[in-house]
Structures are given as C-alpha cells and as structure tokens.
Amino acid sequence: MLPSSGISLLNWACSWASSLVGEQLGSYTPVRSNEINEVFRLEFARETLYLKIGPHLQREYERLQWLEGRLPCPRPVGFMKREGTDHLLMAALEGNDLAELSASLPPRVIVERLATALNRLHAAGIAGWPFGDVAPNNVLIHGDACLPNFIYRDGELRGYIDVGDLAVDEPEVDLAAAVWSLQYNLGPGHGLAFLREYGQMDANEERVEALRRKYELGPGPVCP
C-alpha cells in the first residue's frame, strides 16, 4: 500500500495523465511494480496507457522517443519530474511478455521468440545514435534482455519494453541476460538452444555458463 504522500503523488500523476490525453481517467490498476519502480495501467475511454513512477526514467523516455519509428515499442506520451520523482507515461502494448507466455508455451517456442527479438534488435540501424560514442562492431542492445521485456501477441513481436538501459554495446551483454533469464524462468538446459537459434552454431555449454556468470557478476539481475 502506498503511503499518504505516495497516494497524493499518484493522484497528481493521474490528473497529469488525464490532461495529456484530454479525457477523464476511468480507472487505474497497479501492475509489475518492484522495489525500484511502480507501474500503473490507466484505462481511458479511447486508449490504455501505462504510468511508470520511479528514479532515472528520463533515460527511458528519451530512448523510447529515439526508438519510435525504428522498432516496435511503447509510444512515449509524456515525461514529468515532481518532488524528485520521475513520471513516465506511455501507450500500452497489447500482448503478453515471454515470461508470462512461458507458462503456456513449450520452451522451444520461448527460445525461438527470444532469439528472434534479439536478432531483430541487434540488426537495427544505429545511425544518429545520440546517447554516446559508437565503437566498431557494437550493436543496438536492450541492456536487460530478460523474458519479461519482450511482448508478443499471436506469435508476433509487438515490442520491447523497459528500455532505459538501451545502448550501443557488444551483443554479449544481451546474450548474457537472455541465458540467465531462460534458466531462471524455464530451468537449466535452454541456454545452448537459444544461442544456436540466435546464430552462434559453435556455442557449447561452457559458453552458456560463461554468459550466465557474466550477467550475475555484472551490475546484478534486474528482472526475472
């Protein structure tokens, strides 16, 4: 339950969202909150939005703006900072994330879809990347390529979410997170199939373990 100060801030944020949409908010529901961010699903008559409240969300807002028209992602609606807290408003992507889908789909399908999403991301053009230098052989990476951050509907990739760590870097950054997340969500034994589906046909279990450890020894797991 939010403290009174948090409820007051949420009420302000809902009013701010209504002003941007131009209509009264129907309802809101807390979803996918963690110790860092709180996320709410806002239902309006004409559309559904997500409101994310937490620190350092301007990075995500700026990256959503850059991604728009390049790759599928939530449409950024607005960003505001109030009382030292960031508020990010974005359009909903209809579908389910790969972690949710893993409860009903065979592991091989989850592996294939994760590989498809990362191959598409890593092949995207990075001309005009505005957030830092671009080194040779680097690609566009998600930055936390865990299963909950890829939305699918009817077998089609609908978009990438939680893109605050989007960067231009080595693809191994995403591969390490993907291997770790597959093991967390599906259990051991799927990392090798994923790497080969991604295109690394010479991968072996030693490579899988090295990537898993790379993620665990990095900044630390961010999402399951």
Image (spheres, helix red, strand yellow):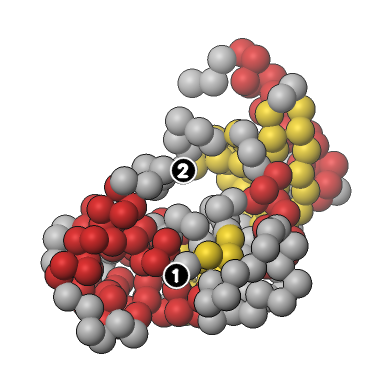
Quadrant housing residue 195 = bottom left
**Who's the residue at 54% across and 36% down the image?**
37
Front residue (pair 18, 223): 223
Quadrant housing residue 101 = bottom left
**Who's the residue at 64% across and 68% down the image?**
134
Q: Are marks 1 and 2 in contact (CB under 8 Å)?
A: no
Q: In the rendering, at what x and y percent does residue 35 appear?
A: 45, 30
> Which residue was labeled with disc 1?
171
Q: Is residue 204 visible?
A: yes
Could you classify mark 2 by the number of other residues whose Cα lies within 10 Å: few (under 14), some (14-19), or many (20 or more)?
few
**Who's the residue at 39% across and 66% down the image?**
172
In the depicted structure, whether residue 178 falls above or below residue 121: above
Front residue (pair 42, 172): 172
In the depicted structure, whether residue 80 falls above or below residue 93: above
In the current view of this chain or complex, which residue is farthest to the front?
136
Could you classify mark 1 by the number of other residues whose Cα lies within 10 Å: few (under 14), some (14-19), or many (20 or more)?
some
Quadrant housing residue 19 = top right
Q: In the rendering, at what x and y percent does residue 5 appear?
A: 65, 15
* Label annotation for residue 32: 2
Front residue (pair 213, 89): 213
Q: In the rendering, at what x and y percent does residue 136 appear?
A: 57, 75
Question: For the image shown, how many numbered marks are present on the structure?
Answer: 2
Query: As shown in the figure, which amino acid type bears the numbered disc 2?
Result: Arg
Secondary structure of residue under mark 1: loop
Query: As shown in the figure, which amino acid type bears the numbered disc 1?
Result: Pro
**Of the residues under marks 1 and 2, which one precedes in the sequence?**
2
Q: CA distance from mark 1 to mark 2?
A: 27 Å
Front residue (pair 205, 179): 205
Secondary structure of residue under mark 2: loop
Residue 83 relative to residue 155: left or right: right
Q: Is residue 27 visible?
A: no
Residue 146 relative to residue 139: left or right: left
